[in-house]
Image (tube, coloured by chain):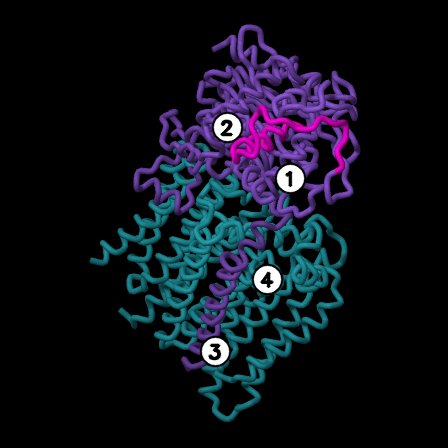
Chain colours: A cyan, B purple
């Protein structure tokens, strides 16, 4: 029975990927190319490998975590193939790499996910370092090669490519913060009497994340992405301690950070684009073209391969939801919102069912992070939030967002398995 | 310990719901605002490269077709193999007017994979673009275009018994504007066909009725004076017949007739001939007028009776001639013969418009007799076609600047008409500034009719 379910969603996702690529082919060239078979097989094999690994090392895991993820990755690959066929093979390799990394995590953590708790400091520090350090040169005015937002240009010799370390850093930060707060919470249970002072440490962590990430806000002007980090740290502290002061602290720090950020010309530019994308010139082109694409998609979309998503700059990464909205319409947009909702709900379900505090907080932190990143990217696109170029895990082109997403998934799968109790 | 997690999750889910609402706003409620935004380049991209159906004549001449761009799939180039002679009727891909503009939706390919189109495909509908067949006679159109090349003006020709439009030519063709159906010009004496028909049909007068022959006439109860061309009497004696007045295009008889027929009845006849409503052809927008509509001013009505105030298009005047040619029945002109599928099979005939009686057969015969005399001994002698009986009426209308517009309205052959035409020549071109119906329009009609009559 279980085999049947697994086979069904593995095959289903592979069919979605293959069929999507076929539709793009037909829409663009009128005939189906060999890419359909390659994508179908690559996708099917990847997922089959992942399912085998889950069977071996996390057999108790909920399948609600994996199948919506697989569908999102399939959809993302189809959209990337549609917008820029050159990037699709690279994305396939990144999917393979992501799945291998996920299997690696399952393998490493087969002795128990709680092993990550003691290294929480290191994970959090490493995560923050990944997020902030690359932008320090830009902050000092030394580097002008990375023109926009969260992207960095990395190069050896004359080979340059763009990376966005934010997502991976955020996953490490989430797990690390979960480790720090749950460890303190467990300690405070054993040393009764430390009381309020103990909880203040948690608030200090929120403050520490805030202070360390302010340079990111300053250097990139990406208010929304920065807010994800502050909200994430506050919600983890709140989830671990149940102390609502964590929430208020987070909100106050957001406000203060916003005021401080106003002195950054990059953030002012972001706000200008947000308030009036249609007269913000080149800086607002991404948001402007994305809105035009959304509206042109209407209810049912132009059909895969039949729209003009190439008009949107960086359509495979920053604005992939615009291409989705144009070619698959409101229907496609709502489907993706539902899929992310399912992933979040499944993750929160794992958290609520966990008995171990660290597992509980870590699962909650990872689910919140995935959901917050999606809310930021989609909210930025819809002008509910200032625009951001935060890479959407699973959907967007780029190795690191994809890797980050798969890492988070592997952790959730492992925690989900342990929630069943020792086998 | 789960309560904070549940709370946060609840907030996040509220966020997701807000996203659904936002997406609905952007992609449904406010979608048109973005889709039609001037910065949205999709509109132009979609119009440009799309496949469209073929436009051809019933006789098989291809006027427009789409050719797949060898460079890029899904992108088509529109070709107009028939050349300039058809440009003003067919229009271009980008034009609002012309058949391309008017039937842009009907000609489009429906292979867009939009949901409604996919549904239609599932029910077996053919999504390939439809072809449009029009009634134009390709050779006549080509010939008329050549004849008009060095002139400024427009020509319309229709088949009197059916209303099929045979030719619609505008010159100069650059910039491409359709003027044979889609513009109004001062008509002058060609309107006398209508005044005469109204008088004969109501038995106010016969063709031999006599009128006092004067050079000028002070209209009773009005300050206006109606004069004959050149301010001379029509003939040598003291009285002149309606026939002679018609043949020589004298004004006074028609001014008197309009008053005798009366404003209301003149309105009825003018409207029956299409003044005030037009021809109903999709190419045509403005409605012709004769200038005396609902007028209680006798001066105005008398003047309108001579055609001095009338405005019309060549296509409309061709239908006026066709009424006379067709025994008093008006067959409204039509251009769209049929819609075909992509294989050229006819799938829809819009159906010919209902013919209606305008004047009695007897009246039509009398007017036709007068019109034939215009060619044999009157102002239209230059429209003669050797070996064929032609009927017609000339006109010279003046615009507000006093510039002449020369008209010839007629049909042939008289005993069983196969064509009704109207020629309008503007000042400029080969004839210079001073054009008249008899000297500028009639020769063009003669060339065109002789081509038509010799061919058939």
The alpha-carbon separation of the residues under discs 4 and 1 comes to: 72 Å
Element on which disc 2 rests: helix
The alpha-carbon separation of the residues under discs 2 and 1 comes to: 19 Å
Question: Badge 4 is on which residue?
Answer: A383
Viewer-nearest of discs 4 and 1: 1
Question: Badge 2 is on which residue?
Answer: B363
How far from the left and from the top, in percent, is residue B326?
47, 25
Q: Is residue B200 left or right of residue A51?
A: right
Q: Residue furthest top?
A: B387
Question: Badge 1 is on which residue?
Answer: B259
**Numbered mark located on residue A239 in the image:** 3
**Magenta residues (range):** B189-218
Q: Nearer the viewer, residue B181 or A321?
A: B181
Element on which disc 4 rests: loop
Residue at mark 4: chain: A
Q: Residue furthest front?
A: B238
Residue at 75% x, 17% y: name it.
B431
The stretch drawn in magenta includes residue B208? yes
The alpha-carbon separation of the residues under discs 2 and 3 comes to: 99 Å
Q: Nearer the viewer, residue A411 or B292?
A: B292
The alpha-carbon separation of the residues under discs 3 and 4 comes to: 29 Å
Residue at 55% x, 73% y: name it.
A233
- Can marks 2 and 1 be said to lie on one chain? yes
């Amino acid at each position: 029975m279980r085999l049947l379910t697994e086979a069904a969603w593995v095959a289903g996702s592979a069919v979605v990927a293959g069929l999507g690529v076929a539709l793009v082919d037909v829409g663009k060239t009128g005939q189906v190319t060999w890419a359909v078979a390659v994508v179908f097989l690559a996708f099917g094999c990847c997922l089959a490998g992942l399912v085998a690994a889950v069977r071996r090392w996390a057999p108790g895991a909920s399948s609600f975590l994996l199948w919506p993820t697989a569908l999102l990755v399939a959809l993302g690959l189809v959209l990337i193939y549609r917008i820029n066929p050159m990037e699709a093979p690279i994305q396939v390799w990144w999917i393979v790499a992501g799945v291998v990394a996920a299997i690696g995590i399952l393998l490493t953590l087969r002795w128990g996910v709680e092993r990550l708790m003691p290294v929480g400091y290191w994970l959090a520090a490493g995560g923050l370092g990944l997020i902030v350090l690359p932008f320090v040169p830009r902050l000092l005015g030394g580097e002008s090669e990375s023109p926009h937002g969260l992207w960095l240009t990395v190069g050896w010799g004359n080979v340059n490519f763009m990376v966005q370390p934010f997502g991976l850093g955020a996953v490490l930060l989430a797990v690390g913060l979960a480790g720090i707060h749950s460890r303190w919470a467990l300690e405070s249970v054993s040393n009764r009497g430390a009381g309020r002072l103990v909880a203040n440490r948690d608030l200090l962590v929120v403050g520490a994340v805030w202070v360390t990430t302010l340079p990111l806000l300053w250097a990139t002007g990406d208010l929304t992405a920065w807010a994800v980090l502050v909200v994430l740290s506050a919600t983890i502290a709140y989830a671990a301690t149940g102390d609502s002061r964590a929430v208020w602290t987070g909100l106050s720090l957001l406000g203060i950070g916003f005021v401080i950020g106003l002195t950054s010309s990059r953030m002012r530019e972001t706000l200008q684009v947000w308030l009036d994308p249609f007269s913000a010139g080149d800086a607002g082109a991404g948001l402007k073209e994305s809105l035009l694409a959304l509206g042109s998609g209407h209810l049912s979309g132009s059909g895969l391969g039949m729209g003009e998503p190439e008009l949107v700059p960086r359509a495979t990464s920053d604005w992939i939801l615009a291409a989705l909205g144009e070619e698959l319409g409101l229907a496609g947009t709502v489907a993706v919102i539902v899929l992310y909702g399912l992933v979040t709900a499944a993750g929160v379900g794992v958290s609520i069912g966990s008995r171990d505090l660290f597992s509980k907080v870590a699962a909650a932190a990872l689910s919140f992070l995935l959901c917050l990143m999606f809310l930021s990217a989609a909210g930025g696109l819809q002008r509910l939030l200032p625009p951001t170029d935060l890479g959407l895990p699973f959907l967007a082109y780029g190795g690191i967002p994809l890797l980050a997403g798969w890492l988070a998934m592997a952790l959730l799968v492992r925690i989900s398995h342990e929630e069943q109790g020792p086998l | 310990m789960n309560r904070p997690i549940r709370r946060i999750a609840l907030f996040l889910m509220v966020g997701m719901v807000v996203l659904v609402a936002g997406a609905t706003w952007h992609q449904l409620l406010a979608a048109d605002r973005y889709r039609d935004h001037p910065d949205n380049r999709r509109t132009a991209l979609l119009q440009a490269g799309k496949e469209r159906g073929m436009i051809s004549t019933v006789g098989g001449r291809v006027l427009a077709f789409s050719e797949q761009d060898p460079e890029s799939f899904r992108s088509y180039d529109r070709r107009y193999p028939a050349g300039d002679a058809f440009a003003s009727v067919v229009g271009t891909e980008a034009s609002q007017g012309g058949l391309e503009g008017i039937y842009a939706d009907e000609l489009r390919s429906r292979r867009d994979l939009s949901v409604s189109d996919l549904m239609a495909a599932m029910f077996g509908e053919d999504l390939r673009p439809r072809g449009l067949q029009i009634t134009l006679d390709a050779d006549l159109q080509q010939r008329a275009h050549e004849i008009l090349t060095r002139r400024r003006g427009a020509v319309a020709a229709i088949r009197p018994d059916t209303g099929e439009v045979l030719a619609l030519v505008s010159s100069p063709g650059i910039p491409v504007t359709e003027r044979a159906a889609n513009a109004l010009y001062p008509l002058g004496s060609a309107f006398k066909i209508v005044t005469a028909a109204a008088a004969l049909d109501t038995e106010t007068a016969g063709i031999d009725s006599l009128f006092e022959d004067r050079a000028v006439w002070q209209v009773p109860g009005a300050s206006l004076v109606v004069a004959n061309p050149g301010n001379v009497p029509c003939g040598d004696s003291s009285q002149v017949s309606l026939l002679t007045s018609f043949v020589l295009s004298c004004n006074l008889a028609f001014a008197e007739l309009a008053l005798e027929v009366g404003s209301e009845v003149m309105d009825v006849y003018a409207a029956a001939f299409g003044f005030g409503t037009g021809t109903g052809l999709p190419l045509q927008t403005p409605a012709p007028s004769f200038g005396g509509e609902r007028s209680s001013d006798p001066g105005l009505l008398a003047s309108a009776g001579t055609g001095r105030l009338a405005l019309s298009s060549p296509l409309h005047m061709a239908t006026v001639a066709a009424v006379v040619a067709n025994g008093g029945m008006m067959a409204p002109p039509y251009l769209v013969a049929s819609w075909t599928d992509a294989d050229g099979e006819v799938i829809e005939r819009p159906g010919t418009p209902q013919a209606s009686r305008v004047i009695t057969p007897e009246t039509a015969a009398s007017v036709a007799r007068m019109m034939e005399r215009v060619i044999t001994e009157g102002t239209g002698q230059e429209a003669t076609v050797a070996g064929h009986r032609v009927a017609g009426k000339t006109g010279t209308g003046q615009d507000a600047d006093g510039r002449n517009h020369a008209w010839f309205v007629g049909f042939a052959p008289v005993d069983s008409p196969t064509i009704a035409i109207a020629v309008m020549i503007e000042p400029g071109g080969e004839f210079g500034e001073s054009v008249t119906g008899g000297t500028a329009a009639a020769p063009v009609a003669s060339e065109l009719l002789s081509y038509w009559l010799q061919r058939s």
